[in-house]
Image (cartoon, grey):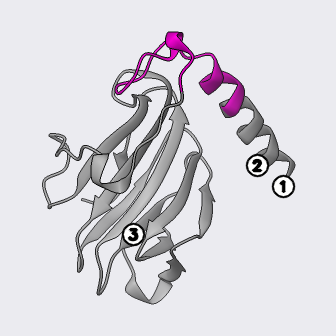
Amino acid sequence: MKRLTLAGLVFAAIASTLPNTNRADTNKREIIAFTPTQVRWFTPSYYTDGRERAQLLGDSSQGGAWIDRAKIPAGKRVLAHTHPQDEPVTVIEGTWYLGEGTKFDSAKLKAYPAGSFILIPAGVPHFVATKDDTVIVQLSGNGKFQTDYVEK
């Protein structure tokens, strides 16, 4: 719990000092806000299975503090992988299925409905899936986002 609290405080402190975002210039000291219809989705080159991403704050491909959303269509799975940094995940929409291990195993999937929060520690191999609905999760970090697949 201490680790989670510390990570949240560090991220909040860093995010509050960002000079700008992809959507607004925070030097103007204005509120940055988006309704769901204003979120701009795109398909990064590393998503080849129908997933999309939206950058809400900062740029996860460049480093620094960032907040992104990922949209995963129904019936998809992401094979076992790790990240070099802790991965805080909030489920915004749908039910996200997460399992721990070096090989995708549907028997190990646990369901996390909208409103759930998960912290996946750096280096922990995990895999994800969606079932009946499109899922949107919110991710955040400090540093360039990176995924290292342990299962091909």
Image x and y of residue 85, in percent? 55, 39
Question: Which of the image's four quarters has the N terminus?
Answer: bottom right
Q: Which mark is residue 128?
A: 3
Q: Amino acid at mark 2?
A: Leu
Name the residue located 24 percent from the left edge and 78 percent from the top edge: 74
| SS of the residue under disc 1 | loop
**Residue situated in front as seen by the camera: 145 or 117:** 117
For residue 106: magenta? no
Q: Which mark is residue 1?
A: 1
Magenta stretch in the rendered image: 12-30
Q: Is residue 56 left or right of residue 123?
A: left
| SS of the residue under disc 3 | strand
Q: Is residue 32 left or right of residue 47?
A: right
| SS of the residue under disc 2 | helix
Q: In terms of sequence position, does the residue under pointer 2 or pointer 3 come before the other?
A: 2
Name the residue located 39 percent from the left edge and 81 percent from the top edge: 105
Quarter of the image for residue 145 reads top left
**Residue situated in front as seen by the camera: 36 or 58:** 36
